Amino acid sequence: MTALKPIPFTGAPFPKSEYERRQKKVLEAVTRADLDAVVVTAHGHLRYLSGYDGMGAYFMPFPLILVPGRAPTYVVREYELTGVRAESYIDEIACYTEQTDFAKVCADVLRRLGLAGKRVGFELGCWNLAPADVSALQERLPEMKVADASRLVSSVMAVKNELEIRAIRDAMAMTDVAVRAFQQSLREGITEIEMAAAMQGEVRKAGGDEVRLVSIGFGERAKLPHTKLTRHPITNNEPAMVEVGGIKQGYAGALVRGAVLGRHPEAETLHSLAEEALEAAIGAIKPGATAGEVDAAARQVIERSVRPQALNHRVGYQTGAPWGERGNISLEPGATDILMTSMTVHMPVILLGNDDYLFGCSETLLVTERGAEILSRTPHTLYRA
């Protein structure tokens, strides 16, 4: 392949050796799962293994095929080829043009790699792979045995190394800047859009990239689980909640923080309970604990409270890069995944009130030998403006 002239502001977030290390770990998991290969299609998993963020795969899947003893092969849309080369460390790339070409090209690559009659893992439970895609491949490769490998890459991603942990710490530093701006800018009449601009502005002043704003909800709009930014202003005696994450090299430092302008009894009650439940979950985190045990620690606090039905979702999930991915470890009732040192989890304890307000707080935590390390320096107590 002819060497390409570098394109400004492109390139993978980490050195090539880091992606080779990750691919090696995934291939070890492939062998343990008694698979002959894995076909990776989830965007977050693609970035983890190649450097490319998978953005071009909105059109059709961009399978990254990992086979023990072979170089990884990327199957991508021809239109996106330059971007994949510029942003990844993958040398073996096969291209298709339109939707109708995908199955033929991908099947030809799988056949060339000797997988036509082998047991191949697909991310059947993740985003970006449709049942029709799998069916089309099976029609062309009827002897190929399709296995569900939805959890294979995420199980490797769950345990972070120092490069990743440093990125999350840097991201969280910018999250803290954004949250402090949220708190200091909270005043009667400010709109959600104006608040977002204030937060982004402070992050840029601090030298960070733009943060990802999942939601900002003022007043009645705090009843929405995820909000769109609007010109809705906050007035006195109303709650405000933000979910935000700084981003560094694709890694997020996620955080939920609540505030009240004046007084709001329902929000104050919910936040006090969320703090107690969150702290119980933090106390349950240690190597060897199960994801279900951490969920239960928080859930038990709520079930014996004045709002026993307030928690209607899981307590947390595996996070990092990306912020969240379907198929990753989930801290939910009965979950049997074992927590290990150097895992990172985000635990948003957001509770439902009698008047349908959603309110609470969260922490992103690093699992250490001593238990949980809170990565934010902004207290999760209720902010009063």
Image (tube, helix red, strand yellow):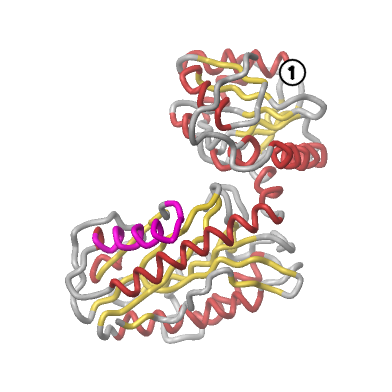
Magenta stretch contains residue 306: no
Above-or-below relation of 83 to 3: below
34 left or right of 167 in image: right
The residue at the point 62 percent across, 14 percent down is: 2
Chain part drawn in magenta: 194-209
- Compared with 30, 358 (above or below) is below
Residue 84, compared with residue 176, is above or below; it is: above
Quadrant in which residue 307 is drawn: bottom left
What residue is drawn where x is 56% and y is 16%?
A: 95
Residue 119 placement (x, y as % from top left): 75, 28
Horizontally, residue 294 falls left or right of residue 246, namely right
Q: Nearer the viewer, residue 383 or 283?
A: 383
Give the left or right position of residue 132, taking residue 2 as reference.
left
Identity of the residue drawn at 55% across and 63% down = 346
Q: Quick one: quadrant of the N terminus?
A: top right
| Tally of marks | 1
Mark 1 neighbour class, 10 Å CA radius: few under 14, some 14 to 19, many 20 or more = some
Nearer to us in this view, 179 or 140: 179
Which quadrant of the figure has residue 280? Answer: bottom right
Seen from the viewer's position, the closer of residues 165 and 46 is 165
Measured from the top left, where is residue 165 in percent x and y?
65, 58
Relative horizontal placement of residue 356, taking residue 296 as reference (left or right): left
Which amino acid, by three-letter code, is at mark 1? Leu
Q: Which residue is mark 1?
A: 113
In the rendered image, the quadrant that contains the C terminus is bottom left
Q: Which secondary structure, mark 1? A: loop
Say if the magenta span includes residue 208.
yes
Q: Position of residue 5 (x, y in %)?
A: 55, 22
Residue 291 percent coordinates (x, y)? 65, 64
Query: In terms of secondary structure, what is the magenta stretch mainly?
Result: helix
At 52% from the left edge and 74% from the top edge, which residue is drawn? 377
